[in-house]
Image: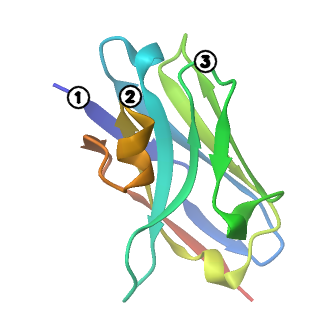
Amino acid sequence: QVQLVESGGGSVQAGGSLRLSCSASIRSFSEYVMAWFRQAPGKEREFVAAISWNSICTYYADFVKRRFTITRDNAKNTVYLQMNSLKVEDKAVYYCAADLELSKVRTKTPGYWGQGTQVNVSS
């Protein structure tokens, strides 16, 4: 049974920072590509960032480059998303996701999803 649990969401003013965490109950966590997606009200879920099993490769959506950083700690079965210089348009529910294949992440079809954590950014 795979379980992904996000935490760290909340409310912040524009320009502020938040750090999201995703704790994963996955056997062989270190084999999985981990990712973050987000969904704003009335919009489709979109890819934010992903990280390879060994942290060597990271991938970002253009709209978060140089502001967000994805990292992972395989010893703790946890993936993080450090979000800096937050903008009002970053307001969304942020979801953690996992899959053994990067292609599944790229096509927004990872095998496992968390329940999401709300991020609110005010002006």
Q: Disc number at residue 54? A: 3
Determine whether label 1 and label 2 are within 8 Å by CB: yes
Q: Which mark is residue 24?
A: 2
Give the percent coordinates (x, y) of residue 73: 60, 20
Question: Left or right: where does residue 90 sit relative to residue 117?
Answer: right
Q: Which residue is mark 1?
A: 2
How far separated are the C-alphas under marks 1 and 2?
A: 7 Å
Residue 110 location (% of width, % of height): 31, 45
Query: The N terminus lies in which quarter of the figure?
Result: top left
Measure how far apart labels 2 and 3 are at the Cα level: 16 Å
- State yes or no: discs 2 and 3 in contact (Cβ < 8 Å): no
Task: Say what secondary structure mark 2 lies in.
Answer: strand
Circle 3: residue type: Asn
Q: Secondary structure at mark 1?
A: loop
- Looking at the image, residue 89 sits to the left or right of residue 83; the answer is left
Q: Is residue 109 above or below residue 86?
A: above
Density class for disc 1 (Cα within 10 Å; few <14, some 14-19, many ≥20) is few
Say above or below: 31 vs 95: above
Write the residue at 27% across / 40% down.
112
Colouring scheme, one of rainbow, by chain, secondary structure, one colour: rainbow
